Amino acid sequence: DGHFQGRPPLALLRNVCVACVVFDSFFILIYSMTALRVTSVGTQQAACYEARGYVWHLLIMFTYGANALAAVAGLSVHASLTCSASPTEKQVRNVTRYAHGLAACTLLGTILEAVAFRQEPFECSEQYGAQESSQGAGAADETHLVWQIAYAGLWLAWGA
């Protein structure tokens, strides 16, 4: 706590923006890879969705892609303030606007994912596949659980 006392607010904002540049870079990679995974055509899950007429996964893919683009925008906004010799009022305003936009996009994306999750046919869900196979399901369940916890943590970190 004592380390940051007495520092000017712009210096503190610059430190936060440095951390945000790192997070934005991670989010670009993670959300891009997740969007590509969701769009995997020819998988058993995609065939299950098609057979049951489920199309919400396309909206989920869109939200992952939009999140990746939002992370690119965040990288630009945060890097602009971080790399400037003296931050301008416009750069600080852009960071504030980005934060408000990110909060709105996070809320919208969360609502869309919740609706899509509720609409997913149970036969196509990962829980159904885990119930079907009794061998090897433990490792898959643990991996899925770790991914869900990490994903929720990333959402919280990015929206904070």
Image (cartoon, rainbow, N blue to C red):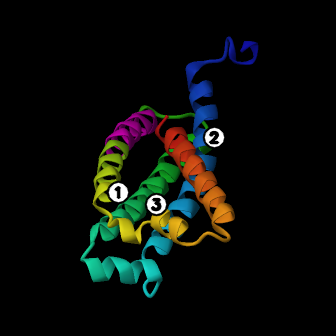
Q: Nearer the viewer, mark 1 or mark 2?
A: 1
Q: CA distance from mark 1 to mark 3?
A: 20 Å
Q: Main secondary structure of the magenta part?
A: helix
Q: Which of 101 and 115 lies nearest the eye of the viewer?
A: 115
Residue assigned mark 1: 117
**Callout 1–callout 3 Cβ contact below 8 Å:** no
Q: Position of residue 139 (x, y in %)?
A: 69, 63
Q: Which of 83 and 68 lies nearest the eye of the viewer?
A: 68
In percent of the image, x 48 and y 57: which residue is there? Answer: 72
Q: Nearer the viewer, mark 1 or mark 3?
A: 1
Residue assigned mark 3: 68
- Looking at the rendering, in which quadrant would you find the N terminus? top right
Q: Secondary structure at mark 3?
A: helix
Q: CA distance from mark 2 to mark 3?
A: 17 Å
**Magenta highlight on residue 77:** no
Lower position in the chain sequence, tag 1 or tag 2: 2
Asked if residue 1 is positioned above or below residue 30 in the image, the reply reads above
Q: CA distance from mark 1 to mark 2?
A: 32 Å
Q: Is residue 1 left or right of residue 111?
A: right
Q: Nearer the viewer, mark 2 or mark 3?
A: 3
Q: Is residue 155 left or right of residue 83?
A: left
**Callout 2–callout 3 Cβ contact below 8 Å:** no
Lower position in the chain sequence, tag 1 or tag 3: 3
Q: Position of residue 99 (x, y in %)?
A: 41, 38
Q: Please, what is the three-letter code of the amino acid marked with disc 1?
A: Phe
- Report the span colored magenta: 90-105
The number of callouts visible is 3
